[in-house]
Amino acid sequence: MADAVMNLLVESLCELITEKVRLIKGAKEELDNLLQEITILKAFLEDNAQQDSNSNLWKNFVKNIRIQAHKADDVIDKFLLEAKLHQEKNIWKKTFGLCGHTRRVSNLAQVIKIIRRKVKEIQQNNSEALVAKPMLNLGPKTLARDPQDTFLEVKNIVGFIKEANEVIERLVEGTEEIECIPIVGMTGLGKTTLARKVWSDSQIIAEFSNNIWVSVGQSNELKNIFLVIIKSSTGPNQEIRCNGENELAKVIASFVTEQHRCLIVLDDVWASELVDFFKNVLPENKKGHRILMTTRHRDVASCASKKPYHLKFLNQEDSFRLLEKRVVDNGSCLNDQLVELGKSTASKCGGLPLALLVIAKALKGNQTVYFWKRIENNFWQYVMKENDTTSCWKIVEASYVSLSSEMKACFLYCLAFPKGYDIPFQMLIRLWMAEGLIESSPINFSSSEDKAENYLMEFENLDLVIVSREITGSIKRVKCNEIFYEFYKMEVTKECVFQELCKPDFPSINDPDTSRRLHIVSCDLSAFISRIPSAEHVRSFLCFPSKDVDQQTKSSSIVHDIQPILKAFPLLRVLKIESINIPSLKNLNQLFHLRYISISGNFKELPAFFSKFWSLQSIIINTSQPTLNIKANIWNMSKLTHLKINKPSKLPLPSTQKGKGSSSIQTLSKIAPETCNKDVLGEASNSLKKLSIQGKIEDSLKTNSDRFSTFEGFQTFAKFECLENLKLISDVPCHSNAFQFPKALFRFLLKLKKLTLSKTMFDWKEATKLGQLECLEVLKLKTDAFTGKSWNPEKGDFRKLQVLLIHSNDLHTWEASGSHFPKLRVLVLECPKLESVPAELSQFQQ
């Protein structure tokens, strides 16, 4: 993961040299030289990490480079902290401290010089590792694995009868055209075993004149695959004189033409191009040739067929049956205690046949209660034996190894969250950015979000994570796949991604390479604080709620003074500790390197000193107060993109602030309506994507004689070119009947996708106007958003609306049809007085 470290170091150096150059006068030359060398080395690591990831020489080289990068990162940030504190002093203290500051700059230059020299020594001493190599194939080099050598024998298959019959039916029936039936599922689920059962079935043997089995793997070498097919068709001793893939393809096409029906099984396919190539090679002779393929990649399966066969996990009954069948000899049986232990152990396998077979092999060696209890207690030690080909290790590792170095770092970071934790997508993106795992520039946030989404889709594709989505398709939450969670936690430890703190014996956090990111559950926090050592190298501290703490009361029942943490970790970049209550924010005033902060407490205000945190990107505050007064000059924080408060917050006026800067804020939630004047919202209008306004908004919504809302913030909507999500929530129902939507809402919010209204009491005639929002996909009309007894929308509007929620206590009639909502997929109605749901829309009701 050295390149992730290098990303942060390069970013810090660039910022230091360009934006904070006044602080490093006397050390700039050394920092420039270090930046140049680190940039070149970073590019080299990115280009070569994938091909050399299994080399011990390469791993040692990467580790040494990472250590030096960490040292440089620490030295620079420690210097910047001291320089910032010096800058905060009054003129007299600055004068008296000038000599000390000059000395620190000189020391910085010397230390950077030493680090540069050490980096050069590492390069010189690892010349072999640094030799550029041609890109290597990561996949297996064996061409055709004999299906008789597959790990699970056909005679012992449990639970695949129904699945095999369904696949056989699809192969035998269907059209006379060439068809591909993909079997898709996660590693170890039994895709190859099912394909073997189908391939050797008597009905398949009778139906297809030639059945060919090819193990593909990641090598994906067409020439070798073609040779396997030809030899399987013509016999192993026949000499083949063909050069190149095209000639081999012609031979295959010619041979298949002579066959009645041909079945080619492609096992473990990693690329959709391979299936496309085979479809083009096989002749269209109306004989119903079939391709049966297995793949762990959902996108490959989808490209091969519109109806992939998704292999499911075994249920608990079949899991134990398979385990029992592999453990006991014919005619013997388990006693009641072993049956109970066997069922408990089988349940830990999560319905995964491969894990069941591995654990069955271990159980078979000693059928005593003591031994079986020991295996159950140390389950993952048996299932995941490193470099043991009979365990799940190699097969599971293949999915992880296929990822790029940056993707590996992002995936392993997900395991900082407790097992079973649903990670909000937006939170995960911002944490990745704050940690330097993906680009963190506020200007390119959209591209960073796209990259993060692509990464998660690939993780989902490989069954590394489980992704839950909005009905519109956007990712909502992410959860690590629990089946192999423990396996990847071992990778987390090896790659020093983070360190887990837990009682009773907390691990040492003195190693600046392994203890840079710490995570802990809230029930262990008090014990850790009581013995916390100083560790300036710690950059991330994440505290999660304990499993035994109720989710609703977790932040109101636990109070901790975290001052010892802040004192011990002065260079923190990430502080996520909202699972407890913090008494005061004042102790945060020297965490100048913060990039991400998420905290809870009884806060009345966000102090002004937050605006001095030059790298802060995300602020998430949960307060028990009814409102939060923001004193910090958020408009001058150029890196800040995300401000999320659980209660209405009062924003500062840009005109009253000194040092006016350029805002990059993309999320403002929740904002008190009285502070939403045109100056405030206008400051963020060019970048804002999500805006949530909550409070008493009745006065703000009243219209003047020109039928324009007196809510000054609406007047800035002409500048809101990026706004995609708008929430307008009134804490108490409005009572005026004169509320109308401002014209600017429809004229300028051209990208608005989500709109939520609550207690705004608009007339239902106004609801029809919302159809003018051309990009609107989700419309949530919560309690008393509109008032009146009937809604008659107009045809031709709501062209892209997919989700509609209506909560109304007085809506009686709704005259609508499918033509009013042509794209609707979900309809949620909480309308007790509604006489009937429009017939054409009732199918979408949930």
Image (cartoon, rainbow, N blue to C red):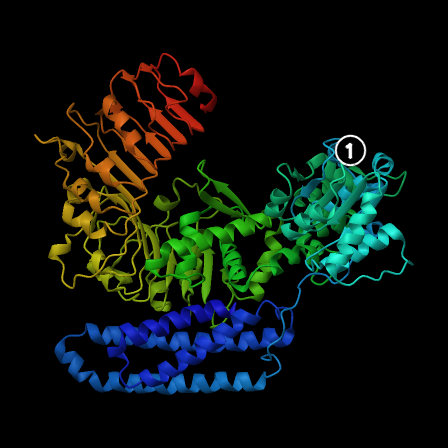
* Residue highlighted by disc 1: 172
Foreground residue among 733 and 778: 778
Residue 704, x across and y down, in percent: 9, 31
Is residue 327 visible in the rendered image? The answer is no
Q: Residue furthest left?
A: 705
Question: Quarter of the image containing the C terminus?
Answer: top left
Left or right: residue 719 versus residue 360 is left
Q: Amino acid at mark 1?
A: Val
Give above or below for 523 relative to 694: below
Residue 562, x across and y down, in percent: 34, 59
Give above or below for 554 relative to 777: below
Foreground residue among 773 and 394: 773
Quadrant of res 573 = bottom left
Is residue 555 visible in the rendered image? The answer is yes
Residue 511, x across and y down, in percent: 49, 73
Residue 660, x across and y down, in percent: 17, 61
